[in-house]
Image (spheres, grey):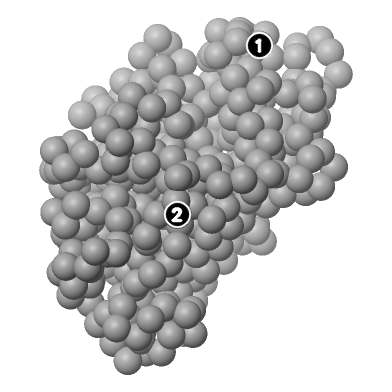
Amino acid sequence: MINGELKVARPIRWAMVGGGRASQIGYIHRSAALRDNVFKLVAGAFDIDPERGRDFGLRLQVEAERCYGDYQAMFDAEAKRPDGIQAVSIATPNGTHFAICKAALHAGLHVVCEKPLCFTLAEAQELRALAEAKGRIVGVTYGYAGHQLIRQARAMIANGDLGEIRIINMQFAHGFHSEAVEGANPSTQWRVDPRFAGPSYVLGDVGTHPLYLSEVMLPALKIKRLLCSRQSFVKSRAPLEDNAFVMMEYEGGAVGTLWASAVNAGSMHGQKIRVIGSKASLEWWDEHPNQLIYEVQGKPAQVLERGMDYLYPDALEDDRIGAGHPEGLFEAWSNLYYRFALAMEAMDKGDAALAGTLGIPDIEAGCEGVRWVENCVRSADLGATWVDYA
């Protein structure tokens, strides 16, 4: 159970690129990183507008001389300080992630990056090689993976509670972009522009979230081939899709489906994952993250609750406030960030083995997300045909 004791020898000196006043995601990064006192925000290049970024940084109590106009100026200046930053989080539009992450690694910094890590598998592999050469951690913010019951599902599947895994059904299908809302919302405009969003909209923006949950729950399951069909129901978004269906075949015989959508009118989030085995099934829904549905064939369905003693130890390790009190996305992100800090500290001590045991969405997760999107786009562009997973 997490009780607030310091988990690292001293807080990691940390900065942000992006995440400024108008950011949709900047605050949850800061809240998660600072909650357990494992990071200390000491610098930032918070906004594309230097003055606006400086004003925002000052209101976060960052020293004026450490509120920078751009990320490269920050990396250069901080490298000359004895108390310079050790890690950086990247909370900028997708098209900037590769360049900023690469520059941060060259500067010897650990990185936490919004997904997607980059646009192509070749870029992802370049970042992976650079991170390995520098001995740095690259974390990717698949924030839903920090919920405790995801770890419970992983432990149950590993223990054989479900039997042989047959089917994985995934979706992240909300309705908030069922109309062309980007016309009046600058923070949405870049998400549907290939220059900034890359080769995909909903596959990369929401589809990779349940995909990563499946990878956490079923780490040995590997995709053999897939088929993707994608649509642009709001025509101005073409060639980027606002809806997509993916069918997957896995090595060993299991099959999976994933529905990613921003036009599921009326749906709040609609992110669910259901894993079906020969004996039983599990289902988790992010709108009810404190419950895991466990259905054994021939028996009444059970609702497993977060924080209860009947859960596996892995699920209780990240408990913060005991059973009965609902926890949400801020706690889940905090669980990821404290694990990022532990991994960074381990790498700084040369203990890559320890860093590899912490269950974080790391550079491998980032590479796999990019690889999956690339294969989905290839399948769709070939006319929704089956393609071998390359």
Q: Is residue 275 left or right of residue 300?
A: left
Locate residue 248, reporting x and y percent: 40, 27
Residue drawn at x 66%, y 11% is 161
Mark 2 packing: few (<14 Cα in 10 Å), some, or many (20+)?
A: some
For the N terminus, the image quarter is top right
Q: Work out which quarter of the rendered image holds the C terminus and state it.
A: top left
Q: Is residue 194 above or below residue 120?
A: below
Tag 1, which secondary structure?
A: loop
Corner quadrant of residue 208:
top left
Query: In percent of the image, x 35 and y 43: which residue is there?
Result: 344
Give the residue pinned by disc 2: 11
Q: Which residue is drawn at the image coordinates 45% and 62% (left, top)? A: 40
- The picture places residue 168, in percent across and down from the top left corner, at 53, 26
What residue did someone put label 1 on?
161
Quadrant hosting residue 319: top right
- Amino acid carrying mark 1 in the image: Asp
The disc, 2 or 1, on the residue closer to the chain's N-terminal end is: 2
Residues 262 and 105: in front is 105
Question: Residue 7: x percent and y percent?
Answer: 53, 43
Direction from residue 307 to residue 244 in the image, left or right: left
Q: Does residue 287 lie above or below 55 as drawn?
A: above
Q: Nearer the viewer, residue 306 or 271?
A: 306
Is disc 2 placed on a helix, strand or loop?
loop
Measure the alpha-carbon separation of dots 2 and 1. 39 Å
Q: Amino acid at mark 2?
A: Pro
Of badges 2 and 1, the one in the foreground is 2
Lateral position of residue 157 relative to residue 231, left or right: right
Across and down, in percent, residue 261 comes to: 49, 53
